[in-house]
Image: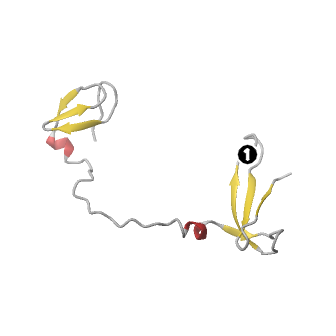
Amino acid sequence: MEFCDECGSMMKTEGDLWVCGSCGAEKPREEATEGGMVTTQGQEEGEIVDLSESEEDARPTTEAHCPECGNDRAFWEMKQIRAADESETRFFTCTECDHKWREDDH
């Protein structure tokens, strides 16, 4: 990968030149420096794996009592929803009934 000295944009190869698609600047290609560059040319096509169904199983769980069904496991996540100098809010989702609730530090 090469970047334009004039505007900083990524350059493309055209024959023996690097050409900037933004400003049109050109510079000669150097075989010695290109030898160390990594490209996607010649790489094998990989299998695309759909993880959407397994994403839920990858979320962290904790022991938490669901107020709806009484289950004792829940997925959890923390988010900063107030000022930066205040603690984060913990959000829970029941692993059984998908009921959602939150817990704030007081």
Q: Residue at x 80, y 69 (%)?
A: 66
* Colour convention: secondary structure
Residue 16, compared with residue 73, is above or below; it is above
Toward the left, the furthest residue is 16
Toward the right, the furthest residue is 106
Which residue is more in the foreground, 92 or 28? 92
Q: Residue at x 74, y 56 (%)?
A: 90
> In the image, residue 16 lies at what x, y percent?
13, 37
Which residue is more in the foreground, 50 or 14? 50
Q: Which residue is mark 1?
A: 81
* Left/right of residue 68 with respect to residue 36 in the rendered view: right
Residue 52, compared with residue 69, is above or below; it is above
Q: Quadrant of the N terminus?
A: top left
Quadrant assignment, res 25: top left
> In the image, residue 69 lies at what x, y percent?
81, 73
* Left/right of residue 104 with respect to residue 8 in the rendered view: right
> In the image, residue 73 lies at what x, y percent?
73, 73
Which residue is more in the foreground, 11 or 100? 100
Judge the density around disc 1: few (<14), some (14-19), many (≥20) Cα neighbours within 10 Å. few
Q: Residue at x 49, y 66 (%)?
A: 51
> In the image, residue 28 lies at what x, y percent?
16, 32
Q: Residue at x 35, y 67 (%)?
A: 47
Q: Amino acid at mark 1?
A: Ile
